[in-house]
Image: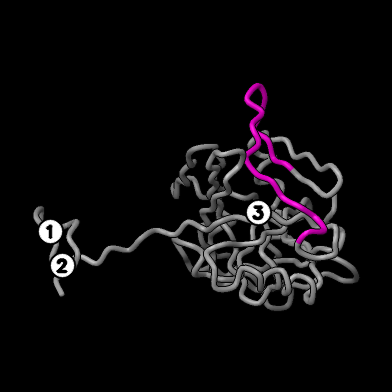
């Protein structure tokens, strides 16, 4: 699947939506229980998620390409069960949690503690169409990479096709339109498939005292 070298996140299904020329909303009322804080013992923590382990030197090099920009290079990973974002400023609806993530790969898995979750909204232009997706993610600073789990698309009956160094995510038939594209051997010399996406963050408008006449106005200098 092209992700054998990558760290893995597991345990909770990815939440959110995927649509060409639009966005599926995320309904907080339907938020699964694994996004809520859990009581765990320090001696035997419960791993809420699993994430594939990516070699730090390689992943940090790719992640640095997006530094200072409103974009992400995300590993499209078949083994991870939740999304991971390192920079909380890329997310909205940030909440505190207390969950554990099992990070797999070669050797014994490592258990990481995650203190925040958020909502990531991204966009990629595919064949002239704007394709957006919204996904709940774990926020783990310094993790080494940003992860988009394949199960996010598979849960929505999308098809994932990998041919050579190219990967495509397609909407279910009969539509079958491509909603996401990625590449291996492009951003580094590995067979990890990266998708380059633009992060969509809400514009914050500062307003004065709420009233019908000034709710949309900017503050006076």
Nearest the viewer among 217 and 92 is 217
Mark 1 touching mark 3, by CB under 8 A? Answer: no
Q: Which residues are magenta?
A: 168-186
Q: Residues within 10 Å of mark 1 (few under 14, many from 20)?
A: few
Relative to residue 120, is residue 114 drawn left or right?
right
Location of mark 2 (residue): 208
Nearest the viewer among 151 and 65 is 65
Question: Residue at 78% across / 73% down in the picture?
Answer: 110
Label 3, label 2: how far apart the Cα atoms are: 41 Å
Q: Residues within 10 Å of mark 3 (few under 14, many from 20)?
A: some
Answer above or below: position of 99 versus 162.
below
Mark 1 touching mark 2, by CB under 8 A? Answer: yes
Horizontal and vertical percent position of residue 212 = 10, 53
Horizontal and vertical percent position of residue 104 = 81, 65
Mark 3 residue element: loop
Location of mark 1 (residue): 214
Which one is earlier in the sequence, the residue at label 1 or at label 3? 3
Mark 1 residue element: loop
Answer above or below: position of 43 versus 179.
below
Mark 3 touching mark 2, by CB under 8 A? Answer: no
The answer to if 195 sits in the magenta stretch is no
Direction right: furthest residue:
107
């Amino acid at each position: 699947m092209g992700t054998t070298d990558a760290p893995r996140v597991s345990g909770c299904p990815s939440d959110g939506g995927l649509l060409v020329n639009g966005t599926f909303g995320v309904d907080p009322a339907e938020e699964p229980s694994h996004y809520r804080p859990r009581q765990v013992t320090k001696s035997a923590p419960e791993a809420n998620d699993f994430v594939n382990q990516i070699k730090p030197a390689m992943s940090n090099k790719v992640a640095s390409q997006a530094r200072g920009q409103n974009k992400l290079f995300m590993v499209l990973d078949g083994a991870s069960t939740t999304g991971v974002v390192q920079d909380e400023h890329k997310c909205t609806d940030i909440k505190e949690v207390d969950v554990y993530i099992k990070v797999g790969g070669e050797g014994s898995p490592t258990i990481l503690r995650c203190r925040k979750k958020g909502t990531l909204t991204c966009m990629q232009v595919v064949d002239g169409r704007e394709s957006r997706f919204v996904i709940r993610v774990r926020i783990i600073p310094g993790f080494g990479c940003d992860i988009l789990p394949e199960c996010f698309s598979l849960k929505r009956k999308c098809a994932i096709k990998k041919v050579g160094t190219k990967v495509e995510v397609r909407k279910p038939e009969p539509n079958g339109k491509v909603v996401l594209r990625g590449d291996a051997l492009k951003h580094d010399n590995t067979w990890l498939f990266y998708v380059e996406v633009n992060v969509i963050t809400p514009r914050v408008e500062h307003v004065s005292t709420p009233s019908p006449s000034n709710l949309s106005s900017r503050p006076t200098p």
